[in-house]
Image: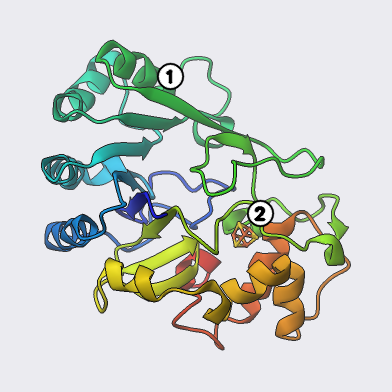
Amino acid sequence: MLAQLHILLTYTCPFECDHCFVYSSPYAEGTFSVGRLNQLLDQAQDVPTIDWIYFEGGESFLFYPLLVEGVRSARERGFEVGIVTSGFFAATEADAELWLRPLAQLGIADLSVSDDAFHHGEETDNPAKRTIRVAKHLGIPTGSISIDPPDGFGTIGQAKGEPVAGGSVMFRGRAVDRLAPGLPGRAWDTLNECPFEELETPTRIHVDPYGHVQLCQGISIGNVWKTPVRKIMEHYRAADHPICGPLVEGGPVELASSYGFDPDDEYVDECHLCFETRRSLLHRFPEVLTPHQVYGMA
Ligand code: SF4
């Protein structure tokens, strides 16, 4: 049952982390307009099972007035609202309060703050910690997301279908290009399950500024600027989808085998093989494997 709509408010981010799923950076393009945002929230209202709206990125606070308007508009429509941020704005606790108080007054139900060395180095006090302290003081339910650097002992990620809450790097996006080289791997033909996403019966979807409805970063099942979310979800059948079908049947191994991808002997984890296979298929499935920027392509 689809319960969560994650709005990728922008691909732009002040950071350019090695582990970023969506290849965000200060130069990454793609941001919602306020009109598109309200159009999407109208569509979400038409799906009775959706009760949570998450705002994420990129960095959702980079376009602060748009974020505040999105939260206001989502709350007005009766949704619970969560936000994901690095807390980059919290130069001091007073600054954190300036940015967070208006959101606290709108009644957000979750603030997830990326607090790890990828974002903030090894500082003991950092913008994320200041954001968390102030959010708690303002009564905002708050948690931290801390991704461990890869250690060669495999990938421990989030529970299937749940937002990322911590654990080790998953090898999608920039992590494949920056972090995977040189790490120990597993035999490619053992990677026969998608461990992290509910591809058959999605409980959450991600929608980006271009309208792509993504079940995992770079796997689209439709475009909300052409077809409303409700209809996309009503018509979605994993078995009929050229990427999700093989992934459900036999994980990344089946995806690679189905399309004659010539694999290396080993990959760090399931996502690594899945991502490399999909990147080799970009020109074959341009409407489905999109946007190309999350594959590190201009
Ligand atoms: S195996 Fe593929 S679809 Fe599944 S979580 Fe990893 S990258 Fe996403």
User: Can residue 296 be seen in this snapshot?
Assistant: no
Distance of mark 2 from mark 1, alpha carbons? 26 Å
Q: Quadrant of residue 99?
A: top left
What is the x, y in percent for residue 124? 53, 15
How many badges with numbers are in the image?
2
Amino acid bearing label 2:
Phe
**Three-letter amino acid code at the position of disc 1:** Lys
Nearest the eye: 161 or 104: 161
Q: Position of residue 181 (x, y in %)?
A: 77, 56
Q: Which residue is depicted at the point 29% across and 11% down?
A: 137
Q: Quadrant of the N terminus?
A: bottom left
Q: Which residue is mark 1?
A: 129
The residue at 31%/55% (across/down) is 10
- Percent position (x, y) of residue 270? 72, 58
Ligand 1 is in which quadrant of the figure?
A: bottom right
Vertical relation: 285 (above or below) 172: below
Residue at image mark 2: 171
Q: Secondary structure at mark 2?
A: loop
Question: Circle 1 sits in a helix, a strand or a loop, which is it?
Answer: helix
Which-is-in-front pick, marks 2 and 1? 2
In this rendering, position of residue 31 left or right of residue 146? left
